[in-house]
Amino acid sequence: DGGITQSPKYLFRKEGQNVTLSCEQNLNHDAMYWYRQDPGQGLRLIYYSQIVNDFQKGDIAEGYSVSREKKESFPLTVTSAQKNPTAFYLCASSIGGRVEAFFGQGTRLTVV
Amino acid sequence: GQQVMQIPQYQHVQEGEDFTTYCNSSTTLSNIQWYKQRPGGHPVFLIQLVKSGEVKKQKRLTFQFGEAKKNSSLHITATQTTDVGTYFCAENQAGTALIFGKGTTLSVSS
């Protein structure tokens, strides 16, 4: 069954801890993206990668880091430097540019 | 930063009424995509518009791309409770990633 999988669905962490969100796709897509969603803010781009071993910062990259060592995986680390990490995080992938993106189910991160 | 503006932010309608959301940009858009996110769900692709003045229909949904490619609209005829959700427009900028508007949240009462 092809798709894009994010895990876990819900995640709780204590303030000051780094946390890594998983994103895996078996669609053979080259491009992968991470978005953050807050109420009334739409989807804001954190990082994106158009090819393995390469990634670019989006509009709100501060406090986040990513890696793209494999085509199918694009994990996002929320570091302790991120001031307001509690949010809904969405991972997406696409074949390339200017085509539809497929989204994972999202991870709701709560930092207490 | 944000390059596509969506209005309204919220819209409530009675079932059977029509609904329209608008997406505007100060610069020419290369293309526009529309997504729907159901409450508690993730965005799902609806359609992509590329050509100036393009109009596409999907059952009760009509999508338009402006002649100057600076605006787009999504119109739903005779809304149903299944239309509830947030509708996003997004531009897929060449060489980068989808940039989303803030969305229009539609609620429908029966």
Image (cartoon, grey):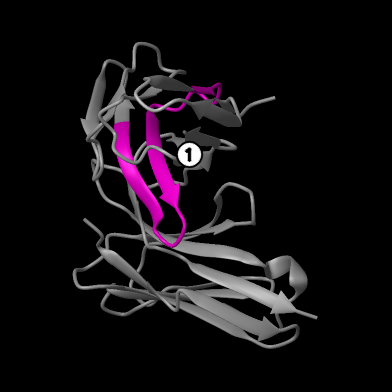
**Rendered-image quadrant of the N terminus of chain B:** bottom left
Q: Which residues are magenta?
A: A22-48
In the drawing, does residue B69 fall left or right of residue A86? Answer: left
Q: Nearer the viewer, residue B95 or A92?
A: A92
Residue A64 to residue B96: above or below: above
Which residue does the numbered mark 1 point to in the structure image?
A: A90
Expressed as whole percent of the image width and height from the top left, the position of residue B53 reads 37, 77
Q: How many marks?
A: 1
Q: Main secondary structure of the magenta part?
A: strand
Q: Amino acid at mark 1?
A: Leu
Residue B88 magenta-highlighted: no
In the drawing, does residue B5 fall left or right of residue A29? Answer: left
Q: Residue furthest top?
A: A69
Expressed as whole percent of the image width and height from the top left, the position of residue B57 reads 59, 72
Q: Chain of mark 1?
A: A
Q: Nearer the viewer, residue A91 or B52?
A: A91
Residue B76 to residue A63: above or below: below
**Rendered-image quadrant of the C terminus of chain B:** bottom right
Expressed as whole percent of the image width and height from the top left, the position of residue A102 reads 52, 40
Residue A76, quarter of the rendered image? top left
The residue sitting at 51% across, 75% down in the picture is B10
The residue sitting at 75% across, 86% down in the picture is B16
Residue A39 magenta-highlighted: yes
The answer, for residue A74, to whether it is visible in the render is no
The answer, for residue A3, to whether it is visible in the render is yes
Q: Secondary structure at mark 1?
A: strand
The residue sitting at 40% across, 63% down in the picture is B102
Q: Nearer the viewer, residue B64 or B81?
A: B81
The residue sitting at 34% across, 60% down in the picture is B31
